[in-house]
Each structure stands twice: as C-alpha cells, then as structure tokens.
Image (cartoon, helix red, strand yellow):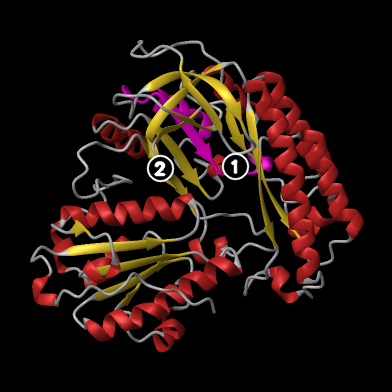
Amino acid sequence: MQRIQLQPWSSASAEELPAVKRFHIWTIGCQMNEAESAKAAALLRQAGYLPAAHEWEADLVIVNTCVVRQQAEDKALGYIGALARLKRRRPEVRIAVTGCLVTGQEERLAERFPWVDLWYGPSDFARLTRLIPELSEVDIDLVELPHYYPEGQADPEVTAFVPVIYGCNFVCSYCIVPYRRGRERSRPVEHVVAEVTRLAEQGVREVTLLGQTVNAYGHDLPGQPDLADLLAHVHEVPGIERIRFLTSHPKYFSDKLIRAIADLPKVCEHVNLPVQAGDDEVLRRMRRNYSVQEYRERIARIREWIPDVTLSTDIIVGFPGESEEQFLNTYRLLEEIRFDKVHVAMYSPRPGTLSARWVDDVPREEKRRRHRAIEELQERIARERNQRYLGRTVEVLVDGVARGRWRGRTRGNTLVFFEAAGEWRGRLVPVRITEVSPWYLLGEPAVVGAPEPAGVAH
C-alpha cells in the first residue's frame, strides 16, 4: 500500500479551533466522483458546515475513493490508513468513506479500518444522516448543486459537473464500475434542466453532463429521451454559454447525437470517445461490442459533420494476452486518427471482473514500455496538431488563475493561459495564440475590454 503523509499537525488544541463545524473532503477518481464530492459539500453547507483547508481543521472528513486502477485504490487506502493518526489525536472527528471502494466491501473495510465512522456507497447521500444529524433538516433531493464556494471566495464557479445518468449496463471484462455503481439510472430531463438553471442563476457558464456511459442516457425513462434530446433542452437554459458531456461509448454514438453537436451552438465541438485498443481480438476480449473499423467509421462521421472537432480517447496497454503485434495495431490506430488527447493506462486486474480470472501475462516492465511509447507518440501528435492554433484567435472561457496567469479552455477543451490586467474570470475572451505546446497554448487577449466575440476559431 502506498504511504500517504497527511498535512502537518496543527499546534492548536481542539479548544482553540473555531466553534463552527467544518468539513474536509478528499477525492480521487473520475469527474463523477468530483461531482458527488461537490454535492456532499453543498449538503453540508446547507446543514451549517463550512469547508476546512486541511484534515486536522475539520470536524468531519469525507474520503471519496476510486478503484478503477490499482494506483487509485492504493492512494485511497493509504489516505484512509493515515487518518488513524488524526482519530487518535482528536477522537471526536468523524470520518466517512464513500466511492467505488465501498460497495459490497463495508464489513471487510470496517474490520481493517475501525477508526472510520461511516461507509456509504456512491451517491448514497441519505446515509450521511447517520453521522450528521443536521442533514435530517435538509431536502437531499433538492440540493443538486455540484459545487460549493470555499470560505472567503465570493465569486461563483464558472464551470460545473452535472450527473445525468448513474451506473453502467455494459460489462467490459476489465471494468469494476458496473459492480460498484450498479445498473444505469437516468435522471429525468426536467430534473437536469432545473439543476442547470439554478447553476446558471449562480453564475455558472459551462456545464458538463456526466455519466459512466453518458450517451446511454434516457433509455430507462418514459418516452426514452436520448442524450441529443437532453442537450437540446439544456441548450435553452439562459446564461449557459457552453455544454459538454462525457464519457461516451462508441456503440451509442449515433448520427442524431453527432448532428446535435453540429447544430446546437452551445454544445462544444469536443468528443471524448474511448477506444481502449486498436485490435479486434483485444476488443473482443475486453467485451467492447464494436470493431476497429466500426470505430473508424464513427470518427469519420464525426469529423465529416463537425470539421473543427477535437477528439480525445482512452487506451489500456498490457491487457491480458496482448501481443506485441496487437499493441502495434493500437499504436498504428493512434497514428492514423491523430487524437488531440489520449489518456493511457496500464492494465491492472480489478477483483470481481472477468479479466481478473485470467493470467496477467504482460510483464509490468513491458506495460511501462508500451505506456511510454503511447505517451511519446501522443506528445508528438499533440504538438503537431496544436500548431494549427499558432497566430489564430480562439474563444476562451476563463475559469481562474494558475501561476500568475489567467487560465481557461477553448470550445475544443484545449487549455489556454494568458497574462492581462483586470478581472477576466467568467468571461469569454478572444485570445490570440502566440506559443503552443503539446499540453496547452499561450496567448494574449486580442482586444482588451472588448465585448464577448462571436465566430472565432474553436
């Protein structure tokens, strides 16, 4: 298990800590985890709690875990283990653990980590009332704000995650998510629209609709609205300037959805479409339900109808039985399609999945070699693709400051930094790109103080 070092212990005694109750949330994993942590924070704010910057300042610590990869699980277990020291020093601190680590594992984990007060599954916010009596006065179903304002921060968030479908009905042979988050459950269109409307009223300008398989949205609802229908409804919310969604499955990436991206001005020209491998036999053993050629055809249709689209994908290297030639097929597919971003991971067996029964026969060092090869290939491709932005003006939604520079993203989800005096947070800014790298762009505002532009490059 990876050892985790907590923040240095404060010299202040418990009596010297502020009387107001405070919470600290530690999160690892996907955007769905981030959204659920943010909702937990919003619930606690409604119950009168305030956020704490560090564990040792908090009356309640929530740990939101991920087990999709072994590394994430190890980090979560290490952090939970390190909290034993905090509990010894301040026994009154309450500790809750949630996320994919918990589902079906509560008794085993409780024996291993007896200092944890509550274990609750993903999105099971009602169980928090067992630990936080104040939450019994809060209508959990109505508190759907997937962000909260840290203490002292007057400005609202610019972007927000909005879960629209939970769980997953696919049973990919390597994936633990269906076992930990259950089957697909879509939120009604009107609930999603109401939440987005509240966010817009608080100043949010961009929302990302979330789901483990987001484009499976709606098949379990009356009338079976799909993701394209949902995008059209969210598009009508005043104040929202941009809409994104992730993560999609190639099987459900329909022509109707592609047309919605092309036709709805607020829907950003960015598609995340995991392929996982570029070899048909590996895809078959992964139980991905499409062929490499079918994936190519989806990408070709997307680029045909959305010429300025940016594309990202996910890759797993070192899957059981993956030969060198099969790996090279994946490598060649990435060379062929030329994604703007590739998220690559080394295969790690997840207990309870089908592939965990198979021999993990690709040596770890070979996995690392393949991982490095994909990273080096993608760094070259991303650098070459980003050259097209040099000298162009792009629309950037500014969401904050990093290292003394304003930070934001293009409609295509490319990170942009620029320096300028004044307050730019929350603004759509035309930025002329002066320098490119594989990971971000640098530029300068095209017109300082100008009104928000229309028709600039994506």
Span shown in magenta: 227-253
Identify the amino acid type marked 1.
Ser
Q: Nearer the viewer, residue 4 or 391?
A: 391
Q: How many marks?
A: 2
Give the class, few, some or many, for how many residues have Cα within 10 Å of label 2's Cα (few <14, many ≥20): many
Residue 211 is a magenta residue: no
Quadrant of residue 45 within the rendered picture: bottom left
Please report the residue visible at 49 percent of the width from the left and 77 percent of the height from the top. 3
Q: Nearer the viewer, residue 5 or 323?
A: 5
Which quarter of the image is occupied by the N terminus?
A: bottom right
135 up-or-down from 190: above or below: below
Would you name the residue on which mark 1 appears? Answer: 248
Quadrant of residue 4 within the rendered picture: bottom left
Instruction: Say if residue 162 shows up in the picture.
Output: yes
| Callout in the foreground (1, 2) | 2
Left or right: 299, with 144 as reference point: right
Mark 1 in CB contact with mark 2 (< 8 angstroms): no
Give the class, few, some or many, for how many residues have Cα within 10 Å of label 1's Cα (few <14, many ≥20): many
Helix, strand or loop at label 1? It is loop
Helix, strand or loop at label 2? It is strand
225 up-or-down from 446: above or below: below
Which quarter of the image is occupied by the C terminus?
A: top right
Please report the residue visible at 60 percent of the width from the left and 16 percent of the height from the top. 391
Residue lying at the far bottom of the rendered structure: 111
